[in-house]
Image (spheres, rainbow, N blue to C red):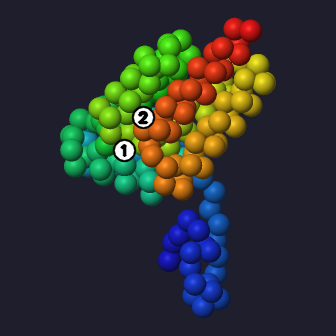
């Protein structure tokens, strides 16, 4: 048996098994193996697409293979955009566009932009926020602004997890960034 969470296996089975823990693979070794498999399967895998698959999989080779298989069902030549389209995750360009809009636009403009990208690409708000968190932490914002935004984003994720309206939470996210903009200007 193989699993990611031992706690999901009932104790009666756990007691009859020996546990082996494997850490995530390094990006380079996962990418090498991914490229070997793509060649064997007759797929034309763009190098940027291979890097994206490995990044999205977080060192889990099973996820790498699942993403490659999903992409191969739709495309024989797999591009970077194909990977993000198949996985339903926001691409770096989508995240950059959203982040720029949140930081530079007025409330209604930013809200329209985020909703348009979210709906046209069928993206989950949770995935967008995960990438926005990385973007916020990588900026030169003051610690106070970072803490404010992360706090607001965690509240939004909590509300989403408890069944809150997605569109209302997008508005809350935009509002958090607009408030952060006004506090940076003071």
What residue sits 29% from the left and 32% below the top? 120
The C terminus appears in which quarter of the rendering?
A: top right
Q: Residues within 10 Å of mark 1 (few under 14, many from 20)?
A: some
Q: Position of residue 69 (x, y in %)?
A: 30, 52
Residue that carries the numbered disc 1 in the rendered image: 87
Element on which disc 1 rests: helix
Residue 80 visible in the snapshot: no
* Front position in the image: 100 or 64: 100
Q: Secondary structure at mark 2?
A: loop
| Residue plotted at (25% across, 41% down) | 43
Residue drawn 21% across the image and 40% down it: 76
- Structural distance between the alpha carbons of marks 1 and 2: 9 Å
**Which residue shows up at 37% across the image and 33% down it?**
118
118 and 186: which one is in front?
186
Q: Residue furthest right?
A: 143
Comparing labels 1 and 2, the label whose residue is closer to the camera: 2
Residue 155 visible within the image: yes
x, y (%) of residue 26? 59, 45
Q: Which label sits on residue 186?
A: none
Does 138 sit above or below residue 157? Answer: above
Residue 150 location in percent, x, y? 67, 35
Left/right of residue 12 with respect to residue 74 in the rendered view: right
| Contact, mark 1 vs mark 2 (Cβ under 8 Å) | no
Tag 2: Cα neighbours inside 10 Å, few (<14), some, or many (≥20)?
A: many
Seen in the picture, residue 135 relative to 13 is either above or below; the reply is above
Q: Is residue 141 above or below residue 40?
A: above
Q: Looking at the picture, how far across and down is residue 77, in whole percent?
A: 23, 35
Choose between 124 and 174: the one closer to the eye: 174
Q: Hey, which quadrant is residue 117 in on the image?
A: top left
Q: How many numbered discs, if any?
A: 2
Which residue matches tag 2?
Answer: 90
């Amino acid at each position: 048996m193989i699993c990611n969470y031992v706690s999901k296996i009932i104790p009666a089975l756990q007691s009859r098994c020996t546990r082996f823990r494997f850490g995530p693979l390094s990006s380079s070794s996962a990418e090498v193996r991914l490229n070997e498999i793509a060649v064997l399967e007759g797929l034309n895998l763009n190098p940027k697409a291979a890097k994206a698959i490995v990044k999205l999989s977080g060192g889990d080779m099973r996820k790498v293979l699942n993403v490659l298989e999903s992409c191969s069902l739709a495309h024989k030549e797999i591009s970077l955009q194909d990977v993000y389209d198949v996985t339903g995750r926001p691409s770096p360009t989508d995240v950059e566009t959203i982040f720029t809009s949140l930081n530079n636009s007025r409330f209604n403009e930013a809200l329209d932009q985020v909703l348009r990208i979210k709906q046209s690409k069928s993206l989950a708000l949770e995935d967008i926020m995960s990438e926005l968190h990385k973007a916020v932490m990588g900026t030169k914002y003051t610690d106070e602004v970072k803490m404010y935004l992360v706090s607001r984003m965690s509240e939004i994720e909590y509300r989403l997890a408890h069944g809150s309206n997605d569109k209302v939470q997008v508005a809350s996210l935009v509002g958090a960034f607009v408030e952060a903009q006004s506090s940076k200007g003071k």
